[in-house]
Image (cartoon, grey):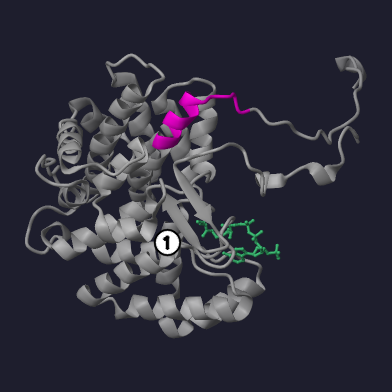
Amino acid sequence: MSTTTPASEVRKGLYGVIADYTSVSKVMPETNSLTYRGYAVQDLVENCSFEEVFYLLWNGELPTQDQLTKFNKRGRSYRKLDPGLISLIHSLPTDCHPMDVMRTAVSYMGTKDPEHFTPDKEHITHVGHNLLAQLPMAMAMDIRRRQGKDIVAPDPNKGVAENLLSMVFGNEEDSPASNPEDVRDFEKSLILYAEHSFNASTFTSRVITSTRSDVYSAITGAIGALKGPLHGGANEFVMHTMLEIDDPNQAEAWVNDALDNKKLIMGFGHRVYKKGDSRVPSMERSFRALAERHDGAKWVAMYENMQGAMDARNGIQPNLDFPAGPAYYLLGFPVDFFTPLFVIARVAGWTAHIVEQYENNSLIRPLSEYNGPEQRHVVPMDQR
Ligand SMILES: CC(C)(COP(=O)(O)OP(=O)(O)OC[C@H]1O[C@@H](n2cnc3c(N)ncnc32)[C@H](O)[C@@H]1OP(=O)(O)O)[C@@H](O)C(=O)NCCC(=O)NCCS
């Protein structure tokens, strides 16, 4: 064993390590609160559009009406269907995970962007607008091709949330895009998913950025990190679990059995929040409202019974993915597209962090405590 530093100094999972400063958001587990650029997330959810929050995360201040109009005009000008992206998506296997399609789409967009990479805010803003316009189209195309349906073209007159719903579900009367309350509850989920300080995917994007690589590479890597079930992938596993349990009256027994077998219950627990996730009350309200409008009493009972069982057993509280999973299900999204929705929202936070990393960069390169064999000599092949 090598013995340069005591093993107790190794922080596995960087548990509790403060890696840098950030002015993008602040997670306060002691008071169970979260602010984006100083505004409580609940305040933003109740009073702002997703685009206003996007603007805030990038620019540090909420926009005036004039600034927002210009921001939206610019952002929506990027909503052009790219024939190359269409044929790429249609060439991918229909049984691959939709997060693989998102990751591939971003990587492809990086090869197509005519703007030469420059590590400054204007360029990153350009890429952010491009991603926010193209990724909802990529996701909607992917859903519809798997369902054998034609593309619904983007609409430059709609906000991000409504436009996304309309491209996925169409514009018929029964589409959530035609119901302003559904649009608003969906938009609230995007605001809640937009940013969360140094989580695994944001940190990944910052690590890649710190090497002075380009923005598309940073976002491609971030998507890979978000896909995992311990991070963004949890919202899908929440719904898979609820569908597997099926009967809310079985929820308590299912949870206890899973815990007896040392299984993780997805949608519960958090690395930073130990007394509950600050985003849950807002998302839970939207989930309950969606359940009222979409005959979702069964999923509310499931939610309550699972939460009650977890609380009684170990006190571990739900995180944002727990109400978001059934909320997306009630809107009609296929379960394996829940994490791609998270990607679209989190582009806001990732790009804000990429700007911050570029503006005050230091290569991110931690050390490790070696615990392999002592130094030794190569034994020639014929003597091994
Ligand atoms: C998010 C997560 C990775 C945080 O992990 P962490 O910071 O390492 O968790 P902690 O160290 O506080 O866990 C303390 C204990 O609670 C247990 N625990 C934490 N979350 C749990 C869960 N969801 N289900 C069952 N047990 C859980 C841990 O296994 C650990 O048990 P142990 O002391 O017997 O080993 C973890 O809670 C988890 O895997 N949750 C499920 C996935 C999820 O919902 N992810 C989305 C996060 S926003």
Can you tell me which quadrant of the image ligand 1 is in?
A: bottom right
Q: How many marks?
A: 1
Q: Position of residue 352 (x, y in %)?
A: 40, 36
Q: Where does the C terminus fall, quadrant-wise?
A: top right
The structure residue drawn at horizontal position 13% and vertical position 46%, both measured from the top left corner, is 158
User: Does residue 246 sit above or below 185 in this rendering?
Assistant: below
User: Does residue 274 sit above or below 308 in this rendering?
Assistant: above
Q: Nearer the viewer, residue 380 or 277?
A: 277
- Give the residue at mark 1: 279
Q: Is residue 205 visible?
A: yes
Q: Is residue 96 visible?
A: no
Residue 300 sits in quarter: bottom left
Q: Amino acid at mark 1?
A: Arg
Q: Position of residue 109 (x, y in %)?
A: 31, 26
Q: Residue furthest bottom?
A: 249
Task: Please tell me whether the stretch drawn in magenta is mainly helix, strand or loop.
Answer: helix
Q: Is residue 183 left or right of residue 14?
A: left
Q: Nearer the viewer, residue 258 or 339?
A: 339
User: Does residue 133 sit above or below 330 in this rendering?
Assistant: above
Q: Is residue 141 magenta?
A: no
Region of the chain picked out in magenta, as a range: 352-364
Q: Nearer the viewer, residue 124 or 7?
A: 124
The structure residue drawn at horizontal position 35% and vertical position 75%, both measured from the top left corner, is 299
Residue 249 sits in quarter: bottom left
Q: Position of residue 21 (x, y in %)?
A: 55, 38
Q: Where does the N terminus fall, quadrant-wise?
A: top right
Q: Is residue 277 left or right of residue 261?
A: left
Q: Is residue 97 left or right of residue 262?
A: left
Q: Position of residue 230 (x, y in %)?
A: 54, 53
Q: Nearer the viewer, residue 232 or 7?
A: 7
Label 1 packing within 10 angstroms: few (<14), some (14-19), many (20+) = many
SS class, disc 1: loop
